[in-house]
Image (cartoon, helix red, strand yellow):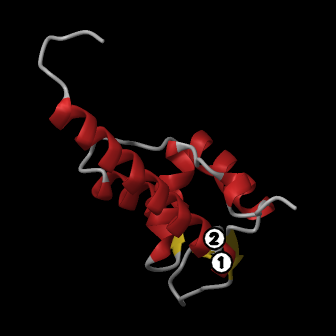
Amino acid sequence: MKDPVASLLPLSPAALHILTAVAGEERHGYGIMQEVFRQSEGRYKLGPGTLYDNIEKLIARGLIREVARRAADDDPRRRYYQLTSFGRRVLAAEVARLGSVLRQAKMSLATSEPGKIS
């Protein structure tokens, strides 16, 4: 039987950023876009099409869910999303996988000779 977490890896960059954005707190779509931009120090910008297409996929896979969060002054069209416990496991596994990739890359760079083609 295939591991359900491993079967979702590697995550696409958009999915990784969205999961990271909602890992700390519930956010609505525009809030997710702002948080992704902040966390990536402006290097990654999600457009609405990419965002909502990925949100649909992440909900379908059980990684995030829509939650009812309404303040009195909140726009009723706003939808809030939060990470599920399964989504947290998938995100943790992806972070571990990427950490391993980075360690290997650092070791390869440290042991390679500049300008030498293998």
Nearer to me, 10 or 84: 10
Per the rendering, the mark at residue 84 is 1
Residue type at mark 1: give it: Thr
Please give the name of the residue rendered at 51% of the width and 54% of the height, measured from the top-left corner.
Answer: 16
The spot of residue 3 in percent (x, y) is 76, 63
- Residue on which disc 2 sits: 87
Helix, strand or loop at disc 2? helix
Using the rendered view, name the quadrant where residue 69 is placed.
bottom right
The spot of residue 52 in percent (x, y) is 64, 50
Nearer to me, 27 or 9: 9
The spot of residue 104 in percent (x, y) is 34, 44
Question: Does 34 appear above or below 10?
Answer: below
Mark 1 vs 2: CB contact within 8 A: yes
Determine the residue located farthest toward the right in the rendered image: 1
Position of 98 with respect to 87 (left or right) is: left
Per the rendering, the mark at residue 115 is none
- The answer to whether residue 79 is visible is no
Helix, strand or loop at disc 1? loop
Position of 105 with respect to 83 (left or right) is: left
Please give the name of the residue rendered at 57% of the width and 74% of the height, measured from the top-left corner.
Answer: 88
Please give the name of the residue rendered at 66% of the width and 56% of the height, measured from the top-left corner.
Answer: 55
Q: CA distance from mark 1 to mark 2?
A: 5 Å
Position of 103 with respect to 54 (left or right) is: left
Using the rendered view, name the quadrant where residue 114 is placed.
top left
